[in-house]
């Protein structure tokens, strides 16, 4: 049985109909339990359907938990710091400057756009640093926020 945040138990366990996403079983909750529940926005975004939780095979789950535990170590944080900085810069370039779409045809013009984008990001970051703008916090998924709240 799986228990939701409101204390209701799942009504069925079924094999997953689309196992390519790694989930082997699905635990389903009753519509009569989910639909009137005041905690529904914390569980699902579905308008009519009840909550369905996908469950992995034990080997996959344990491998994922081991990887997550490794990611909490200081050694992993130190080795990942450079990549995190690069990914943050890339995300900023995509969201602020539209880096995924090149505005020009030709390699030379595309390269010029990328160089100008990098300069623009450096100028913006420098201006924010001088102004003392605090660094944004990392966003949390709905599921991670649900784990913290429970």
Image (cartoon, rainbow, N blue to C red):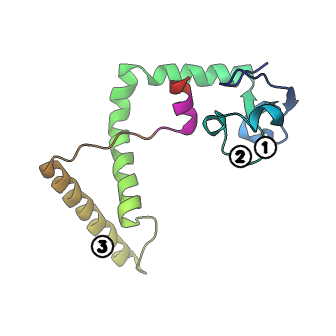
Q: Secondary structure at mark 3?
A: helix
Q: Nearer the viewer, residue 121 or 128?
A: 128
Left/right placement of residue 131 relative to residue 43 reads left
Farthest residue, direction bottom? 105
Residue 11 percent location from the top left of the image: 85, 26
**Is the Cβ of the residue at disc 1 closer than 8 Å to that at disc 2?**
yes
Left/right placement of residue 122 relative to residue 71 reads left
| Residue in the image at 36% along x and 47% along y | 88
Residue for badge 3: 112
Name the dominant secondary structure of the magenta segment: helix
Classify 10 Å Cα crowding around label 2: few (below 14), some (14-19), many (20 and above): few
Classify 10 Å Cα crowding around label 3: few (below 14), some (14-19), many (20 and above): few
| Residue in the image at 41% along x and 66% along y | 98
CA distance for labels 3 and 1: 50 Å
Q: Nearer the viewer, residue 146 or 99?
A: 146
Labels 3, 2: front one: 2
Q: Is residue 7 above or below residue 47?
A: above
Residue for badge 1: 49
| Residue in the image at 19% along x and 52% along y | 128
| Residue in the image at 14% along x and 51% along y | 131
CA distance for labels 3 and 2: 45 Å
Farthest residue, direction left? 130
Residue 25 percent location from the top left of the image: 81, 29
Residue for badge 2: 46
Left/right placement of residue 129 relative to residue 29 reads left
**Is the Cβ of the residue at disc 3 closer than 8 Å to that at disc 1?**
no
Left/right placement of residue 6 relative to residue 77 reads right
Residue 24 percent location from the top left of the image: 79, 31
């Amino acid at each position: 049985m799986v228990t939701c945040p409101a204390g209701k138990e799942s009504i069925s366990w079924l094999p997953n109909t689309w196992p390519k996403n790694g989930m082997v079983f699905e635990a389903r909750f009753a519509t009569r339990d989910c639909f009137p529940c005041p905690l529904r926005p914390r569980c699902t975004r579905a308008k009519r359907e009840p909550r369905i939780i996908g469950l992995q095979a034990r080997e996959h789950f344990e491998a994922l938990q081991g990887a997550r535990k490794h990611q909490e170590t200081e050694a992993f944080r130190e080795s990942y710091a450079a990549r995190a900085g690069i990914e943050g810069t890339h995300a900023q370039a995509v969201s602020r400057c539209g880096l995924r779409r090149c505005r020009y045809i030709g390699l030379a013009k595309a390269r010029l756009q990328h160089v100008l984008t990098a300069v623009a990001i450096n100028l913006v970051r420098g201006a924010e640093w001088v102004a003392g703008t605090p660094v944004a916090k990392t966003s949390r998924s709905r599921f991670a926020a649900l784990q913290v709240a429970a």
